Amino acid sequence: MLVLISFTSMCVPCLSFILWRFQENDAVFITTNFIQTPSQQSGKCPEDTNNKFARCRTDSGCTAGEQVLLGNGFKTGQCVQATGTCEIDGWCPAEVDDKPEPPIFMEAENFTIMVKNYVTFPEFDVKRRNIPDDMKGAYINTCRYHPVSDPYCPIFTVQRLVELAHENFSVVARTGAIFGFIIEWDCNLDFSVEYCLPKYQIRRIDSVEEKIAKGWNFRHADYWNAPDGTRRRTLYKFYGIKFVFMVYGKAGRFSPEELAMNLGSGIGLLGIATILCDFLTDFLLRTDAFGKSKFERIRDTKKKGPPTLKTMLENAKPPGAVMVIENEPDADPDASTLDDDSSSSDEDGSTRRGLPEQTPSGDSGFGVARPEKHFLLDDPVKPVHFQRTRVTSL
C-alpha cells in the first residue's frame, strides 16, 4: 500500500523538520507537538524537578548507583538543595517534560493524505485499486473524502479523519493518539468488477481513559561533535497522531460445482451423523438409557373384562334394528336358571338393570323373553344353561 502525504500552510523549515517522521510500515505519523532539550552532554546534573522519585532533602535520600524511576540517569549520592532533587549521572541538562501550550503544529489539521491501495484476488484473477478508473486528474486534485458526498475520493484531510473517529483535533494534538484507518473490500464478482470498490472506516485504538503515558509519543536524538570534541545531542520528544492502515478483503462468485459439492456433502453428513451417534451411544457408552428414550413402547393398560350379553347383542345388531327375543320351550329339564329378582344389587349396593317381565302378545310368539329366572344384560357371559331364546331383528 502506498501512502502519499501533502502539506499546506506550513513553513519550509518546519516542513523539513517533520518529513522524515513518516517512514513507518503500514502507518503514518503526523507531529502535532514536541519538547526540545538542546545541547546535552554526558555528565552530572540535577534531576528534573517534576520527577517525584528524585526528590530529596538530604544525601541519605539519594542512594549512589540507584537508577531514578522514570528519570534520566543514575543517582550519585548527592542531594542538590537548590532544586530539591538528587544529582544524576547521565545526559545533562536533564529533560524537562513540560508540553507547550497550545500545541506547536495546530496547522497539521489541514494536512491532506492521499491513499493508494491495491488488492488482488488470485482465485478469480482480479486486481483492484481504491482509485476508480473513471476518475479524472482534475477531480482527484480538488476532491476531499466525505462518507456521503465523496465516498471514493482517495484524498483525506487530517481534521476529517479525526472527526470520523468522533474526536476533537485540538484535544488530540496535545498528547497524541493512535487511529486505525480501515480499508474494507467486499466484492461480488457476479457483477462487473467496476462495482468492486472499498469502504473506509476510522477508529481510535488507544483509550482516552488511560492515566499514565496517555496518548502517543516517542523520543528521538540528533548527535554531533562540538568544536572541542565533546559528544553532544539534541533530544526531541514528539507528540502526534499515528494512523495505522488495516486492509481487509473478500470476494466471491457463484459456482454450480461448489453448490453441488456442498449440497451433496451436507446431505451425506446428515445421514452419517445419525449412524455415528447410534454407534457411540449403543456400543461405546454401553447404556440402554438412550434406547429407552429413543423407542417408546405403547401398551394397552386398560384391562378388558369378559364379554357380556349386552355387548354381544349390540355388536350383532344391524344399524337401526330393534331387538326382539322369542321364548322357546327348554328341552333340557336340568337347565339351571339365574336369580329370581328382576334387579339385583352388587356388593357395593349399586342396582343393576335386568329384563322386565312381560307377557308375550298374541300367539305370534314374539315379545320380550320371559325366562323362568331373570338374567342381567351387564353380567358376563358364563357357561350356564338358561331358557333358550331366539333373537330376531325387525
Image (cartoon, rainbow, N blue to C red):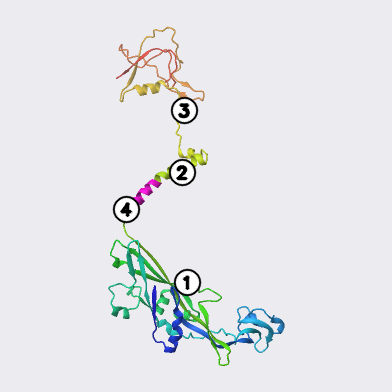
In the picture, measured across the screen, residue 183 lies left or right of residue 175, that is left
Name the image quarter holding residue 57. Answer: bottom right
Q: Callout 2: helix, strand or loop?
A: helix
Instruction: Tell me which residue sits at (41%, 74%) in the image.
Output: 164
Residue 192 x, y percent position in the rendering: 28, 65
Q: Earlier in the sequence, mark 4 or mark 1?
A: 1
**Which one is in front in this view, the residue at disc 2 or the one at disc 3?**
2
- Number of residues whose C-alpha sits closer than 10 Å to that of mark 3, classed few (under 14), some (14–19) or many (20 or more): few
CA separation in Å, label 3 and label 4:
62 Å
Q: Residue furthest bottom?
A: 227
CA separation in Å, label 2 and label 1:
47 Å
Q: Callout 3: helix, strand or loop?
A: loop
Q: Which residues are magenta?
A: 256-269
The three-letter code of the residue at mark 3 reads Lys
Q: Callout 1: helix, strand or loop?
A: loop
CA separation in Å, label 4 and label 1:
43 Å
Q: Callout 4: helix, strand or loop?
A: helix
The three-letter code of the residue at mark 4 reads Glu
- Number of residues whose C-alpha sits closer than 10 Å to that of mark 2, classed few (under 14), some (14–19) or many (20 or more): few
Instruction: Tell me which residue sits at (32%, 12%) in the image.
Output: 365
User: Which quarter of the image is occupied by the C terminus?
Assistant: top left
- Residue of label 2: 277
- Residue of label 1: 205
Q: Residue furthest front?
A: 229
The three-letter code of the residue at mark 1 reads Ile
Residue 303 marker: 3
Residue 25 x, y percent position in the rendering: 45, 74
371 relative to 297, above or below: above
- Residue of label 4: 257
Q: Earlier in the sequence, mark 2 or mark 4?
A: 4
